[in-house]
């Protein structure tokens, strides 16, 4: 049995449920790495657009994925870092201001202003998921990332608050509990994916992360190193499959099969003469389907999804400010031609976000865009455990003041997490 800390993560997507068990090692606490020990992957049942619609079915999917990951790893999963997303996610900015009584701004002053900005009334049917400081302002001088040690009389902050629906969150936790596991923490999926596939330079320059899921398409805009906007488009891979069913007159199963085998999102890349032979099934004999027609259907839907993402970015005020380009991830990012179509629509540099950095062990099992969220959740957990472990190990040998200082550094680092 390994002596390194264990982290387990769970991504319950609309199409697939994936679990990872890994150990945390490396240069802790600032740059921990993961050694992937086990991965579990199964089709999801009981979810619709990222929200639990059947607890019993969802429970079975969760149990199957986590059991496979723990069986491969040989390590039990104690608590899970779990992703959450969907149309119930809301984000808002809140500001706070405090007076500085001493000669310079201290860490308690920063904590005080953060508490003030977090103290926004949250409706009873919602819960606060993340509170992420954007920037600080000292005596009307803005753009300050860490004001500790500066001279001033007035300290302000802008806080980015992410809330989720209480009911979806409770049902998700309930399904996990019924499967026999404990939810250590819920984490917004686009933020987890960002930890896995975005670079610090991209986040600084301005980048939009687009997660092409089965039920929804989620987006996150980063600029000057911080999360600035979140959005959800209620269309995804399942919408594309439904379009193929309608447009080609084929079954749901056949539509999924040919989309995975021959799907392309960009019409100029396809030979107009190519046909796809469909095996005989039910009342239908063997048929031939034009790949150009299939690609046209996919192209039109994905173009619409990207146009909606572009509109979100424009309404958020970030058109022309994304010098880091566009990063596509999620299962839909594996579709042929998706990068070319996105580049055409956005007029930006586009890359496919694939996990791999900060990972060791069974890396080959997770180096696909669909694993961005679950690896990001595990990395989030790794940082939490690494920081917690440092506090625990040093608490016994440090004075009370030393522990407070260390806890302050931990809080400071976590403020910069997203």
Image: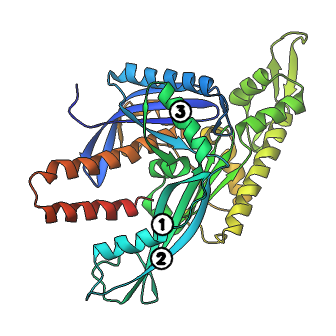
Query: Mark 3 or mark 1: which comes first in sequence?
Result: 1
Quarter holding the N terminus is top left
Could you say which disc has been placed on residue 174 in the image?
Answer: 3
User: Residue 242, image x and y in percent?
Assistant: 81, 33
User: Residue 407, image x and y in percent?
Assistant: 25, 60
> Going 35% across and 74% down the picture, which residue do you hit?
110
Q: Check disc 2 and report the residue beneath it.
A: 96
Disc 1 element: helix
92 sits to left or right of 225: right
> Going 30% across and 52% down the picture, which residue do you hit?
31
Q: Is residue 417 visible?
A: yes
Q: Check disc 1 and report the residue beneath it.
A: 118
Q: Residues within 10 Å of mark 3 (few under 14, many from 20)?
A: many
Residues at marks 3 and 2, CA–CA distance in whole angstroms:
35 Å
User: Residue 412, image x and y in percent?
Assistant: 33, 65
User: Residue 201, image x and y in percent?
Assistant: 45, 63
Report if the CB atoms under discs 3 and 2 are less than 8 Å apart. no
């Amino acid at each position: 049995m390994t002596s390194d800390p264990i982290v387990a993560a769970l991504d319950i997507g609309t199409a697939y449920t994936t679990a990872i068990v890994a150990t945390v090692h490396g240069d802790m606490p600032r740059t921990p790495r993961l050694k992937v020990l086990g991965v579990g992957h199964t089709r999801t049942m009981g979810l619709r657009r990222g929200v639990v619609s059947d607890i019993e079915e969802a429970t079975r999917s969760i149990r199957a994925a986590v059991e496979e990951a723990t069986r491969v790893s040989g390590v039990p999963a104690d608590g899970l870092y779990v992703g959450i997303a969907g149309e119930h996610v809301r984000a808002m900015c809140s500001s706070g201001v405090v007076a500085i009584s001493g000669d310079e701004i201290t860490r308690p002053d920063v904590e005080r202003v953060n508490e003030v900005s977090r103290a926004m009334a949250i409706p009873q049917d919602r819960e606060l998921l993340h509170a992420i400081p954007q920037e600080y302002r000292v005596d009307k001088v803005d753009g300050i990332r860490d004001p500790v040690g500066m001279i001033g009389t007035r300290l302000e902050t802008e806080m980015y608050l992410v809330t989720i629906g209480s009911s979806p969150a409770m049902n998700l936790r309930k399904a996990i509990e019924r499967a026999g596991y404990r939810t250590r923490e819920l984490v917004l999926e686009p933020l987890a994916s960002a930890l896995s596939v975005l670079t610090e330079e991209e986040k600084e320059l301005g980048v939009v992360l687009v997660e092409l899921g089965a039920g929804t398409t989620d987006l996150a805009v980063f600029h000057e190193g911080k999360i600035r906007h979140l959005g959800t488009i209620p269309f995804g891979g399942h919408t594309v499959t439904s379009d193929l069913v309608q447009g080609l007159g084929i079954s749901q199963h056949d539509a999924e099969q040919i989309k995975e085998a021959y799907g392309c999102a960009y019409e100029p890349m396809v030979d107009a003469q190519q046909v796809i032979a469909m095996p005989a099934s039910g009342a239908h004999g063997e048929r031939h389907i034009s790949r150009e027609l299939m690609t046209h259907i996919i192209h039109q839907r994905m173009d619409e999804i990207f146009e909606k993402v572009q509109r979100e970015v424009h309404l958020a005020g970030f058109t022309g400010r994304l010098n880091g380009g566009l990063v596509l991830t999620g299962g839909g990012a594996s579709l042929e031609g998706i990068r070319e179509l996105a580049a055409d629509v956005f007029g930006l540099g586009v890359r496919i976000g694939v996990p791999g950095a900060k990972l060791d062990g069974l890396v080959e099992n997770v180096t696909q865009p669909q694993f961005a969220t679950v690896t990001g959740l595990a990395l989030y957990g790794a940082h939490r455990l690494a920081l917690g472990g440092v506090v625990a190990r040093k608490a016994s040998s440090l004075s009370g003041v030393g522990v407070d200082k260390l806890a302050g550094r931990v809080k400071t680092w976590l403020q910069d997490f997203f």
